[in-house]
């Protein structure tokens, strides 16, 4: 035993510094590889890990498409599993038995910021997932108050006017893409009741193009690397700056006027924090970010639901007159 230590020391001394570093690096990588495999095979009380090739398998699976990943993971591991993707671990909860854990968890159990902070470049700084829980709760209160039942009832005439104007251009017959058409209609009604009369009447096309660039900048890769210097992210960031400039002018004019409009923009212009931020009004950039957030929260779901309703009406034998 006493002779073995000098032997080992001599063996180590026979390597050059570069060779020794390479040997140690290889050993460290192998150790990490084995540890990763063992942690995936024996997750303990955590959801099982669906990765395949350690370190890169999850990213490869995600790159193949989220739907395919979820189908394969569900078939192999059931309704709860985790996929390591780059520097994040994505846990899927699929089905009525496990999904409620996501919706019912408190912020102490499941941090909204950790899940949704990839939206910060889209919504902007200082709103929603870029603030602490108390501030976010206050901002959600602004949403709730702006979309209460009595306020929604006041928006109905504007919904009807936009719908009647939109469908009056259809004609008696023809072919339309219901998904595209209803997406356009939802954008028009949202522009009038959320973003404001000024945007709808004077700036709709420009704002719609900028919102499209924002939406187009939200790619699967954005969830993991929201600041990656891609062309989509560059256009997203430029669009967010321009939207801030446009809404700043509209908000300044609103606050300088004695006229009160019936829309969410007006509610945000008049809103004040209660328990944080010294009770101040929202800044122009905060209002812009909250408007973008509330629009994105409903735009896709509303247009998809409307399109699905349209398809069902067309397919149904009990539909009304053509």
Image: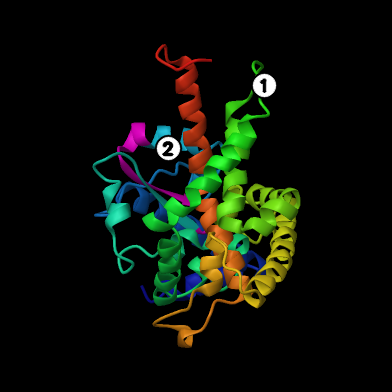
**Are there few (<14), some (14-19), or many (20+) residues within 10 Å of tag 1?**
few
Q: State left or right for residue 149 relative to residue 194.
A: left
Taking the spot 53% from the left edge, 80% from the top edge, the residue there is 281
Taking the spot 45% from the left edge, 62% from the top edge, the residue there is 146
Q: Examine the rendered structure and indicate whether residue 188 appears above or below residue 7.
A: above
Q: In front here: 231 or 73?
A: 231
- x and y percentages locating residue 193 in the rendered image: 56, 53
For residue 70, which numbered disc appears in the image? Answer: 2
Q: In front here: 37 or 121?
A: 121
Q: What's the magenta region?
A: 74-87
Q: State left or right for residue 286 relative to residue 230.
A: left
Q: Examine the rendered structure and indicate whether residue 166 appears above or below residue 119.
A: above
Q: In front here: 207 or 165?
A: 165
Q: In front here: 104 or 157?
A: 157
Regarding mark 1 in the picture, which secondary structure is present there? Answer: loop
Taking the spot 43% from the left edge, 83% from the top edge, the residue there is 276
Asked if one can make out residue 299 in the rendered structure from this viewpoint, the answer is no
In primary-sequence order, the first of circles 2 and 1 is 2
Pick the quarter of the image with the N terminus.
bottom left
Q: Is 248 a magenta residue?
A: no
Q: Residue 251 falls in which quadrant of the image? A: bottom right
- x and y percentages locating residue 227 in the rendered image: 65, 62
The residue under label 1 is: 171
**Are there few (<14), some (14-19), or many (20+) residues within 10 Å of tag 2?**
many
Regarding mark 2 in the picture, which secondary structure is present there? Answer: helix
Q: Is 81 a magenta residue?
A: yes
Q: How is the image coloured?
A: rainbow
- x and y percentages locating residue 231 in the rendered image: 75, 52
Residue farthest top in this picture: 317
């Amino acid at each position: 035993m006493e002779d073995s230590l000098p032997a080992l020391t001599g063996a180590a001394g026979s390597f050059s510094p570069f060779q020794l570093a390479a040997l140690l690096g290889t050993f460290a990588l192998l150790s990490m590889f084995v540890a990763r495999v063992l942690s995936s095979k024996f997750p303990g009380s955590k959801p099982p890990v669906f990765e395949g090739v350690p370190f890169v398998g999850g990213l490869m699976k995600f790159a193949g498409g989220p739907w395919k990943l979820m189908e394969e993971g569900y078939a192999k591991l059931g309704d709860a599993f985790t996929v390591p993707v780059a520097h994040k671990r994505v846990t899927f909860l699929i089905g009525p038995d496990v999904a409620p854990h996501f919706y019912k968890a408190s912020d102490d159990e499941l941090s909204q910021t950790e899940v949704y902070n990839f939206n910060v470049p889209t919504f902007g700084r200082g709103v929603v997932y870029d603030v602490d829980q108390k501030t976010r709760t206050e901002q959600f209160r602004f949403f709730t108050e702006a979309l209460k039942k009595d306020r929604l009832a006041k928006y109905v005439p504007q919904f009807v006017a936009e719908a009647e104007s939109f469908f009056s251009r259809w004609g008696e017959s023809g072919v339309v893409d219901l998904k595209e058409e209803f997406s356009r209609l939802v954008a028009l009604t949202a522009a009038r009741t959320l973003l404001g009369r000024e945007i709808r009447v004077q700036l709709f096309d420009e704002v719609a193009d900028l919102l499209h660039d924002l939406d187009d900048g939200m790619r699967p890769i954005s969830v993991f690397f929201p600041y990656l210097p891609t062309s989509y992210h560059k256009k997203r960031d430029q669009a967010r700056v321009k939207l801030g400039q446009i809404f700043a002018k509209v908000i300044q004019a609103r606050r300088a006027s004695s006229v009160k409009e019936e829309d969410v923009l007006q509610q945000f212009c008049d809103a004040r924090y209660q328990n944080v931020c010294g009770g101040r009004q929202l800044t122009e950039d905060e209002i812009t970010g909250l408007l973008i957030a509330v629009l994105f929260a409903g735009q896709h779901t509303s247009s998809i639901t409307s399109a699905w309703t349209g398809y069902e009406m067309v397919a149904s034998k009990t539909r009304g007159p053509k």
